[in-house]
Amino acid sequence: MCVDAFEKKLRDNATSPTQVSNHLSEARVGLMFVASGSQVTMRESPELMIELVGELFYAEVKRFLRKGQDTLDELAERNTRALFVRVGDTFPTEKREPWEQIADVALKKRNQYVVGAANILVIDSDSEALEGMALSGANGYDAEVRRSPDDAALRRLNGIMIINVCQSISVQYGNVDFAVTRYPSRRMSAALEIALRKIRFG
């Protein structure tokens, strides 16, 4: 998709702030990959076709907005006298843990992954609750693959990437966290996996 076509897409959805925000999220993810040296083509679904280290793969993009739990966590951090405060637990407010929400999205989008190609899910997150959750989300997804071994669509996903754009950079994860799934029908190369783990936002 050329720039003009993307601009038209934004204008066509101008009356829906949510849609415009989602499309801008796709563009932001695309620019992140461009900055890493990738060739990126914007599409309808999956939203991005990317070439990195000589390999082609597809990225489905999902935006996660800031959660009410983030505000509650900030209040708890400001008002406590304790040395540690538990944060990121979305179960009391949403009845799903962050990793479960990530796996849920990955499962919901399984029919959008390209057959016979490497595919990743990229989550563009405004919520600190998702920090460091790529591996847990991938593990949750893998558990469903094991429960449904005959569902070929589940085996199209190669990994989950989370962009943490809302926060200071974590020492452990950086601002991008990537984890592979265990059972894809088409495996990505070690070189591509390493390159994806090195990507940073901004």
Image (tube, rainbow, N blue to C red):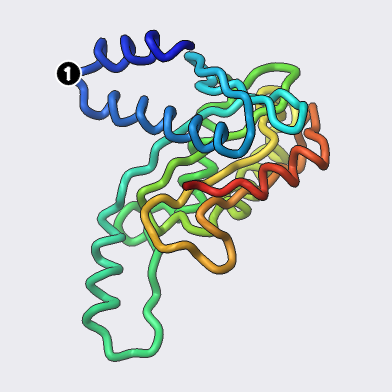
Q: Which residue is mark 1?
A: 15
Q: Position of residue 12 (x, y in %)?
A: 26, 10
79 relative position to 157: left or right: left
Q: Position of residue 24 (x, y in %)?
A: 35, 29
Front residue of 33 and 58 = 33
Residue at image coords 28%, 90%: 81
Label tally: 1
Residue at image coords 62%, 48%: 178
The image quarter containing residue 145 is top right
46 relative position to 117: left or right: left
- As drawn, 46 above or below 136: above
| Residue type at the position of mark 1 | Thr
The image quarter containing residue 16 is top left
Residue at image coords 41%, 63%: 168
Q: Position of residue 83 (x, y in %)?
A: 38, 89
Q: Position of residue 53 (x, y in %)?
A: 75, 33
Q: Residues within 10 Å of mark 1 (few under 14, many from 20)?
A: few
- As drawn, 22 above or below 171: above
The image quarter containing residue 10 is top left
SS for dot 1 = loop
171 relative position to 153: left or right: left
